[in-house]
Amino acid sequence: MAEAVIRVVGLGKSYATAAGLFPALRGVDLTILPGEYIAIMGPSGSGKSTFMNLLGCLDTPTMGDYFLTGENVAHMATDALAKLRNRTLGFVFQGFNLLPRMTLQDNVALPLVYAGINKEQRRQAAREQLDKVGLLKYAESLPSRISGGQQQRVAIARALVNKPQLILADEPTGNLDSQTSEEIMRLFGDLNAEGITIVLVTHEPDIAAHAKRQVRFLDGKLVSDHLTEQLPC
């Protein structure tokens, strides 16, 4: 069996409140293998966003272990964690998070700046990914000149520019209309077919149906984990 891209064991996160510690995540166990396509679901306050922040190394657990491509990152030093995150993970957010005064090309290339890649290589890599999502002709445009769906495609191109093993998408269709959402989900499906592991958070069953596996959280606990019933073609 291939080594897990993600393996969490007894993962937990508590936050200090005026009333004492609040356990947002309570001892979660989960393994994600290369090439999987997983939807994380659950109502508001269920712990799914906390879980995604931990998977993305944007927060640290207060209990348990998190192995990312075989390395235990739960207590890894900040610099080492940043390097591992930059070469392993790609992020897609609900709000696109594009810098408004930078061209689409420069937005896509941004992760390569942090990786120390030279300017010409950054340019070539960014244009390659913009071409992949069908937006190369807008490379020199600003984000304000394109639609929300196109901005999300740019965000996906940015997530891909480091050639990550894993894409984490947090409500990637939350700001989009239904038709554009379907287009974005087809793009995720194409990326998964190429072998990229995808984990997305969504509260929408029709979006989760695109994934091959659905994991549901409730009250900080993982309460179900099952394969998605695929409709016949």
Image (cartoon, helix red, strand yellow):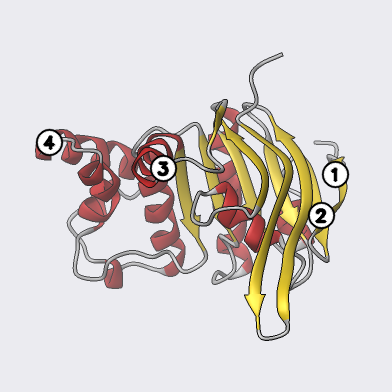
* Residue tagged 3: 77
| Type of amino acid under label 4 | Asn
| Type of amino acid under label 3 | Ala
Q: Dots 2 and 3: beta carbons under 8 Å?
A: no
Label 1: element kind = strand
- Of the numbered discs 1 and 4, the one sitting upstream in the chain is 4
Q: Which residue is drawn at the image coordinates 63% and 45% (left, top)? A: 199
| Type of amino acid under label 1 | Asp
Q: Residue furthest top?
A: 1
Q: Is residue 69 above or below residue 149?
A: above
Q: Dots 2 and 1: beta carbons under 8 Å?
A: yes
Residue 225 numbered mark, or none: 1
Q: Which residue is drawn at the image coordinates 46% and 63% (left, top)? A: 149
Q: Position of residue 65 (x, y in %)?
A: 65, 40
* Residue tagged 2: 216
Residue 118 numbered mark, or none: 4
Q: Which residue is drawn at the image coordinates 63% and 51% (left, top)? A: 200
Closer to us: 10 or 95: 10
> How far separated are the C-alphas under marks 4 and 2?
42 Å
Q: Position of residue 166 (x, y in %)?
A: 53, 37
